[in-house]
Image (tube, rainbow, N blue to C red):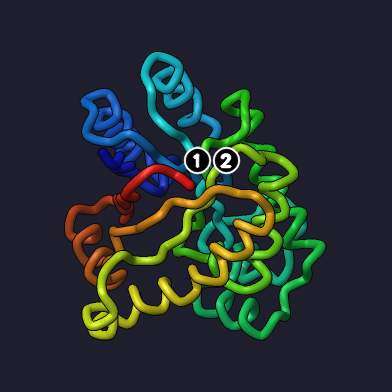
Amino acid sequence: MRKIWLCADDYAIAPAVDAAIRDLLVRGRLNATSVMAVAPSFSSEAPPLAALIAERRAAIGLHLTLTGPFRPLTAFRPLCERAFPPLAAMARLAFFRRLDKTALAREIEAQLAQFAAAFGRAPDFVDGHQHVHLFPQICEEMLAAVKRAAPAAWVRQCGSALPLRILLQDFKTLALSVLSRGFRRRAAALGLKTNPAFAGVYDLDDCRRAASSCAIPATSTRSFAGSIR
């Protein structure tokens, strides 16, 4: 029988969201969450999650965050009003390979260390806020950092199990699947495990509108089918 990991991303983005995620973990509606180590509320929201995880089986991962409005833990450059660049700008920098590799590696290592300091151990898995971990340069530095700091962790690939005829109707899911092919190869070459399938891609504009109407930050739930390999 295949196991499904139902994961809520963005833990630490806001206390109300975090409380809801913890409640769903207690109820067994979720069995994983990924944590934003750069979020302003991380230091206050990590302890209750750590206590909960100590009492029940659930996976906690690092939600690597490299886009604004969040601020880096290190002297990362370039910045946009003291925060990471927005998603589109970060994508341009990564795809044109204009990111400073040393600064990027240092920031990723700092987020991994921040997670380990709060939870007393390495993350069970590592993924990326807004899927930035699949981007060129970021992918390479993240996988290398995970290999050094958390070699037993699995890393999230976002390739869909849907047939190509359906993927061709959804550009975002198709793009993530294409990027994930190279990501899986790099992870395998380093001996890092990945999830075999991914679901939970949504339209960001629709999510933001829904969140705005509820006056809470947008978060997301992902599912991963099968055993980690």
Q: Could you tell me which residue is drawn at 73 percent across and 68 percent down?
A: 77
Q: Could you tell me which residue is drawn at 39 percent across and 14 percent down?
A: 55
Q: Amino acid at mark 2?
A: Ala
Numbered badge on residue 136: none
Q: Amino acid at mark 1?
A: Gly
Q: Are marks 1 and 2 in contact (CB under 8 Å)?
A: yes
- Residue 171 in picture, x, y percent from top left: 32, 82
User: Could you tell me which secondary element the residue under label 1 belongs to?
Assistant: strand
- Residue at the extreme top of the image, as rendered: 55
Q: Judge by depth and name the residue closer to the eye, 105 or 40.
A: 105
Q: Quadrant of the N terminus?
A: top left
Q: Residues within 10 Å of mark 2 (few under 14, many from 20)?
A: some
Horizontal arrangement in the rendering, residue 60 relative to residue 148 (left or right): left
Horizontal arrangement in the rendering, residue 153 relative to residue 160 (left or right): right
The number of numbered discs placed on residues in the rendered structure image is: 2
Q: Which residue is mark 1?
A: 61
Residue 206: quadrant of the picture = bottom left
Quick check: 44 above or below 104?
above
Quick check: 221 above or below 95?
above
Foreground mark, 1 or 2? 2
Is residue 81 in sight in this rendering? yes
**Between marks 1 and 2, how big is the CA–CA gap?**
9 Å
Numbered badge on residue 153: 2
